[in-house]
C-alpha cells in the first residue's frame, strides 16, 4: 500500500513545509519523526517500490548488526535479537514500516533538480514540482559506482563487474578472481567466491576491524562503541571520522586473518592496467578471469543546484544542517554524528534530533498552526488529510 498526503497549491505545484528526498531507511526515519512533530511533509523517491536498493544487492548479503539493533524508530525488527537479517528481509521490513506509520510517499518521483526561489526551495521531479521551506536530503552519499579510470584498458577477456551488480558466484566464469577493495563488501565477496571454489585474490589496504569481543551480548558493546565512543563528540571519533568517510569504515564481524584462513590471497593495491592485465603496486601482473570492483560509490549531488555545492563532494554540514543554506539538511551521511549514523538501526537518533531542529525553525518562522493551502507552519498531525492510493 502506498500512501501520500495531497497538499497542493495550484495545478502544477504542490506546497509543503518539508520535502524529504529519498525513501530509504534515513528518509523513513526522518519522516517518522517529522510526523510525530506534526510537520506536513512528503517523501520523494525515484524507485517504484520501497526497499528496492536492498533487493538488488548480492544474494547472500546480511546485515552486519543483529536484529536487536536493526529497527527504525517506533518498530523493532521482527526477528530474534541475535539474528542477522537478509537483504530481502530488510527490504520487506522497510515496506512494512512505511505502511505501518502511513508515511507520505511519492514513489516514482526522482528529483532532477533542487533550487531556491523567492525564499523557498523548489524541487522538480519529472512532471511534479514541490515548493518547500525545508528540504531534507536522505539519498546517502553513495550514488554512483566508482571504478578506476584505467579499467577499460583491461583485456576484453576479463569479466569486470562492480559489487553493485554482483549477485552470486554463478555469474562468473571459471577461473581466478581478483576482488579490488578490502573493505566490508570486498571481504564478504572474496570469502564467498573462495568458498565457491574460485582461486581468489583480495587487493587493497586494510581498513582495520572492530575487535571480536565487541560482538558479545548480541553486539551490545559494539553498539555502544558505534554510538557513544566513535562519535564526533569524542577525540577518538573525530580521528576516525575522516578515514571512515574517505576510505571506508573498519571491518565488522570479519578480519583479514579470517579471509586468509578461507584461502583468499591478500595482495597489494592494484595500480594500473599493463598490457591488458591488472598490475599490483609491487609490480606483479595478475592473471585473472574476473575482476570485481569493490571500490565503493562516488557522490552525486548534481541535482542540488545551489551555490557552493559540488556534485562529487560531501556537503559541509553541522550534524546534518547546512550553514550556507538555511532550511537544507542531510540525514544518513556516513559518520554524520557517529559511526552508526548510516546504519539502519543508528539513523533514528540523528533523525529525531534533526526533526526537532526543523520543528523549532518552522515554529520561529510561522508560529501559528496552519491548514493546507495557507502559510507554512507546524500542523497538528491529526488535522492533516491523508490520501490513500
Image (tube, rainbow, N blue to C red):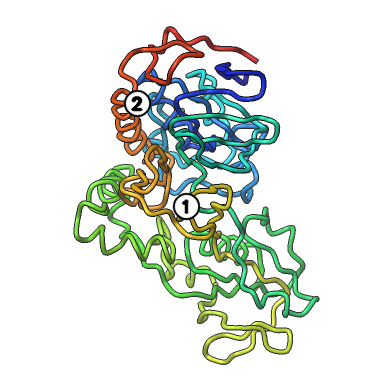
Residue 177, given in percent of the width and then of the height, sits at: 66, 72
> For the point 36% across and 44% down, which residue is it?
320
**Quarter of the image that includes the C terminus:** top right
Tell me if mark 1 has few (under 14), some (14-19) or many (20+) residues whose alpha carbon lies within 10 angstroms of its own. few
> For the point 46% across and 42% down, which residue is it?
84
> For the point 55% across and 59% down, which residue is it?
297
Displayed quadrant of residue 68:
top left
| Residue under numbered circle 2 | 362
Q: Nearer the viewer, residue 160 or 116?
A: 116
Displayed quadrant of residue 10:
top right
Residue situated furthest bottom in the rendering = 283
Q: CA distance from mark 2 to mark 1?
A: 23 Å
| Residue under numbered circle 1 | 307
Residue 101, given in percent of the width and then of the height, sits at: 47, 19
For residue 166, above or below residue 11: below
> For the point 54% across and 38% down, which residue is it?
22
Q: What numbered label is drawn on residue 162?
A: none
**Secondary structure state at the residue bearing disc 2:** helix
Q: Nearer the viewer, residue 129 or 41?
A: 129
For residue 327, above or below residue 204: above
Q: Nearer the viewer, residue 294 or 290?
A: 294
Residue 88, given in percent of the width and then of the height, sits at: 59, 38
Amino acid at each position: 500500500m502506498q500512501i501520500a498526503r495531497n497538499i497542493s497549491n495550484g495545478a502544477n505545484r504542490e506546497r509543503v513545509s518539508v520535502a524529504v528526498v529519498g525513501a530509504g531507511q534515513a528518509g523513513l526515519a526522518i519522516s517518522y519523526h517529522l510526523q510525530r512533530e506534526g510537520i506536513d511533509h512528503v517523501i520523494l523517491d525515484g524507485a517504484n517500490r520501497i526497499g528496492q536498493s536492498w533487493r538488488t544487492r548480492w544474494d547472500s548479503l546480511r546485515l552486519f548488526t543483529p536484529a536487536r539493533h536493526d529497527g527504525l524508530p517506533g518498530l523493532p525488527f521482527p526477528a530474534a535479537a541475535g539474528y542477522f537479517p537478509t537483504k530481502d528481509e530488510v527490504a520487506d521490513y522497510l515496506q512494512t514500516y512505511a505502511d505501518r506509520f502511513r508515511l507520505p510517499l511519492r514513489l516514482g518521483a526522482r528529483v532532477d533538480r533542487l533550487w531556491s526561489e523567492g525564499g523557498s526551495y523548489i524541487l522538480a521531479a519529472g512532471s511534479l514540482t514541490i515548493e518547500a521551506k525545508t528540504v531534507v536530503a536522505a539519498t546517502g552519499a553513495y550514488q554512483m559506482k566508482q571504478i578506476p579510470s584505467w579499467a577499460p584498458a583491461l583485456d576484453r577477456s576479463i569479466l569486470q563487474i562492480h559489487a553493485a551488480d554482483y549477485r552470486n558466484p554463478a555469474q562468473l566464469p571459471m577461473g581466478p578472481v581478483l576482488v579490488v577493495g578490502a573493505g566490508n563488501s570486498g571481504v564478504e565477496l572474496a570469502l564467498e567466491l573462495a568458498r565457491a571454489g574460485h582461486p581468489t585474490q583480495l587487493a587493497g589496504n586494510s581498513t582495520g576491524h572492530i575487535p571480536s569481543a565487541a560482538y558479545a551480548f548480541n553486539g551490545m558493546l559494539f553498539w555502544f562503541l558505534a554510538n557513544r565512543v566513535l562519535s564526533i563528540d569524542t577525540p577518538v571519533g573525530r580521528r576516525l571520522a575522516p578515514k571512515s568517510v574517505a576510505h571506508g569504515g573498519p571491518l565488522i564481524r570479519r578480519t583479514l586473518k579470517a579471509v586468509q584462513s578461507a584461502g583468499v590471497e591478500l595482495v597489494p593495491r592494484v595500480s594500473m592496467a599493463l598490457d591488458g592485465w591488472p598490475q599490483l603496486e609491487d609490480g606483479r601482473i595478475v592473471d585473472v578471469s574476473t575482476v570485481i570492483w569493490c571500490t565503493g560509490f562516488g557522490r552525486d549531488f548534481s541535482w542540488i543546484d545551489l551555490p557552493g555545492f559540488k556534485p562529487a563532494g560531501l556537503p559541509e554540514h553541522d550534524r546534518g544542517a547546512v550553514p550556507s543554506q538555511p532550511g537544507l539538511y542531510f540525514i544518513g551521511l556516513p559518520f554524520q554524528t557517529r559511526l552508526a549514523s548510516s546504519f539502519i538501526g543508528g539513523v533514528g537518533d540523528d533523525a529525531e534530533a534533526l526533526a526537532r531542529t526543523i520543528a523549532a525553525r518552522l515554529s520561529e518562522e510561522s508560529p501559528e498552526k496552519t491548514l493546507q493551502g495557507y502559510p507554512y507552519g507546524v500542523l497538528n498531525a491529526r488535522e492533516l488529510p491523508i490520501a490513500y492510493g
